[in-house]
Image: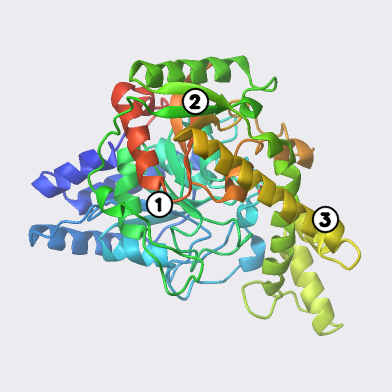
Amino acid sequence: MAVGTAMDERRNLDAGTQSCEALVRAAFDRIRALDGELHAVLAMDEARSLDLARQADARLRAGERTPVLGLPVVLKDNFNWSGLPVTCGSRVLDGYVAPYDATVVSRLIQAGAVPLAKANLDEFAMGSSGEYSAFGPARNPWDPSRVPGGSSSGSVVSVAAGYASLALGSDTGGSVRLPASFCGVTALRPTYGVLSRYGLTAMASSLDQPGPIAATAEDLALAFSVMVGADPRDSTSVDLPGSERLASLRSADLRGLRIGLPREYFGEGLEPGVRSSLEAALRVFEEQGARLVEVDLPHTRYAIDAYYLLCTSEVSSNLSRFDGVRYGLRVPDAGGFPGMVAGTRDRGFGPEVKRRILLGTFCLSKGYYDAFYVKALKARALIAADFDRAFAEVDVLAGPVSPGVAFPFGTKTGDPLAMYLADAFTVPTALAGVPCLSVPAGLSEGLPVGIQLIGPALSDVRLLEVAHAFQSATAHHLATPTLSA
Ligand code: GLN
């Protein structure tokens, strides 16, 4: 990590051996040096970030301390940060400027974090590789001929390439975990509702969750600690029990911890290098006293189907607001209003977004609603019940984030189904609403592999403590790609 962990920065800022302004200037230099190739960043406002940095320095000098005071953070470009464009990786928002701050963004800023940049993403967070960004994909710093994973590709690359020690992504069905696994960083998808969705542009509202990204679980906890807490502007938000333990995260005592290994997650499709990294990671847990138990999540095989029916249904509804009237792009049409709406949506949306709007509209139409949408809801309930049963027997679950490592560009763009299958191990937890982490677990052929840790609803703090214990015993999270800057 070229800029060090957030914890290192925290200590230096508190000790006065480093200023936030210097940190932010160094970050901009690094972005200028590397981002021509990596393309993680879509927009910056250097003057504004430097102004916020000087404010943070003044607060530090006055003796104020918060978990994130003076820490730079990169924001996925589907979060509103007032005054900057929010593109969602789409042409349909051309010219649109965010009029307000998302709750998670305003909480970060109030606590003194300094937003540095808006980060590249798959259009409206739909995708698993970053390749569906209308502005061209971000690249994997471990191997720029490979995808960084998506959809929070730019946020994850920003941490992996050392632009910032903290970033914010969103996870609807895997979008912080998959890129974290592909780029060797740590990321949390919190329990649904623990972070406010207010100001995060909606993709599929019953699944969307903001998710912090960092080098370590300890770093994640710093950012998470200032963002959690119910928000009156998001009626699905809840308080997180134990959140006072986040600001100085301790390692969980792993002795006696029961770790469930879902049989369905260790089947044939796993690449051998991923399997061996996971096995080695699980041995570390065992050496520290954890007990491994095989469990079943029998409805896992319906997860991709259920997810892509429910997600697209919600997408078709949420994205109806982009009509050329209220936001961004407007393509005038001599035929009047209907032609303007159709022309705007045709020009503004990319192929994956259009595919999902069509599929979702189909699922929700008369005659198909019960056969597809309602059936998918039933499958979702069965998948959630699988997790409830498993957590009656074990404390956490462990498995792969992805069946393979980062793939070369273009491998899956010709086949939408192949792209959807990359999410096989990340969508079940999203459907169930339970917290999960991607934690670096080694390299396979020089590319990072993540292990996924999953806990029962609202056990987010405990899950981070378990990951911290693992990272205290391993060094995978310290491995960094070789970059010339
Ligand atoms: N890859 C999944 C999808 O395309 C998840 C995306 C996400 O989590 N935002 O829907």
Mark seen at residue 448: 2
* Residue 53 in the figure: left or right of residue 151: left
Q: Amino acid at mark 2?
A: Pro
Q: Secondary structure at mark 1?
A: strand
Does the closest atom of ligand 1 sit within 8 Å of the Cβ of label 1? no
Q: Position of residue 59 (x, y in %)?
A: 14, 62
Cα–Cα gap, marks 2 and 1: 21 Å
Give the residue at the far right of this rendering. 367
Q: Is residue 370 above or below residue 389?
A: below
Can you give x and y, in whole percent of width and height, for residue 4 in the image? 27, 36
> How many residues crowd mark 2 within 10 Å: few (<14), some (14–19), many (20+)?
many
Q: Is residue 476 left or right of residue 8?
A: right
Which residue lies at the image location 56% right of the left edge and 64% below the top edge?
Answer: 201
How far across and down, in percent of the image, does residue 231 sit? Answer: 41, 69
Residue 421 versus residue 66 in the image, above or below: above
Which numbered disc, 2 or 1, marks the residue that appears first in the sequence? Answer: 1
Q: Name which residue type carries label 1.
A: Val
Q: Earlier in the sequence, mark 3 or mark 2?
A: 3
Whole-number angstrom distance, CA of label 1 to CA of label 3:
38 Å
Image vertical order of residue 483 relative to residue 443, above or below: below
User: What is the crowding at mark 1: few (fewer than 14 residues within 10 Å), some, or many (at least 20)?
Assistant: many
3 vs 2, front mark: 3
Would residue 123 appear left or right of 190 to someone viewing this image? right
Q: Label 3, secondary structure: give it.
A: helix
Query: Which numbered tag is attached to residue 74?
Result: 1
Residue 350 visible to an observer of this rendering: no
> Which quadrant holds residue 84?
bottom left
**Amino acid type of the residue tagged 3 in the rendering:** Phe
For disc 3, the neighbor class at 10 Å (few under 14, some 14 to 19, many from 20) is many
Which mark lies nearer to you, 1 or 3?
3
